[in-house]
Amino acid sequence: MAEERYTHGHHASVLRSHAWRTADNSAAYLLAHLRPGQRLLDVGCGPGTITADLAALVAPGEVVAMDNAPAVLAGAGALLAERGLANARVEQADVYGLPYGDASFDVVHAHQVLQHLGRPVAALSEMRRVCRPGGVVAARDSDYPAMAWYPADPWLDRWMEMYLRVARANGGEPAAGRRLLSWAREAGFSQVEVSASAWCFATDAERRWWGGSWAERVRSSLAEQALQGGHASGADLAAMAEAWERWAASPDGCFVVPATEVLCRP
């Protein structure tokens, strides 16, 4: 098994993209199951924007925002403090060995985490361990091979091929969305409710933001990995970034990011 490496890294372009995420646009499937007073663990919280929304919904219940990247946690902690969410705190931890007792949380949430893990079933099993009877483990992951865009561009096709190779070389599974149900069943959950949703980028502002973000990533956070692994040349990467910029400039540009969601009960 390949050693795990977080494919996106923590470049400013990645953090800006992740900070766009909210509970409404990234965890809507979970919201009806939240109640004031619940104790919630947010696994792989990143910059904390989703965490902050969840913390407001379960207040005065305690929220733990967990990640394994200290710099990212510092930013999440600052955001929680800025929003005055005294019921939430950040902690560095490993999803394969959560430092919490059995049945410690009412809700365990992970957004776009499992796709980056070499052992997603082990992670879900650990999340199941810390979830109380009657609680819920919620996970949402996109499915890269199912993404769709227009206009067509052979260099965006090449970008997708490159991303899939890099992600799998890093130990992850970029087609995670379609596999969430099977992973949850293997992790021992007795009840799994499956749904799907999508992000869609089609306005001028959305195209500029999404296309610009990926053009920057291709030139920065992904470039070193692609070059080191022999997945693309410098010229290839430049052409991919330019393809993203062409897509962003097209008035017909539309990009759809599908994701699968599971609500798992022990």
Image: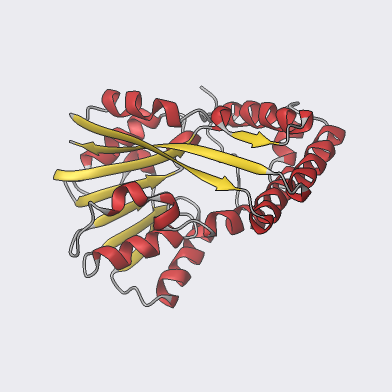
- Which residue is depicted at the point 41% across and 75% down? 83
- Which residue is depicted at the point 73% across and 50% down? 216
Coordinates of residue 129 in the picture (x, y in percent): 22, 39
View extreme (right): residue: 235
Whether residue 53 sits left or right of residue 258 in the image: it is left
Coordinates of residue 53 in the picture (x, y in percent): 37, 63
Vertical relation: 211 (above or below) 7: below
Q: How many marks?
A: 0
Coordinates of residue 55 in the picture (x, y in percent): 31, 64
- Front residue of 115/22: it is 22
Whether residue 213 sits left or right of residue 64 in the image: it is right
Residue 99 in view of the camera: no
- Which residue is depicted at the point 59% across and 54% down? 17
Coordinates of residue 205 in the picture (x, y in percent): 66, 59
- Front residue of 218/177: it is 177
Q: Quadrant of the C terminus?
A: top left
Vertical relation: 48 (above or below) 225: below
Whether residue 234 sits left or right of residue 46 in the image: it is right
- Front residue of 30/153: it is 153
- Which residue is depicted at the point 34% across and 30% down? 122
Its colouring scheme is secondary structure
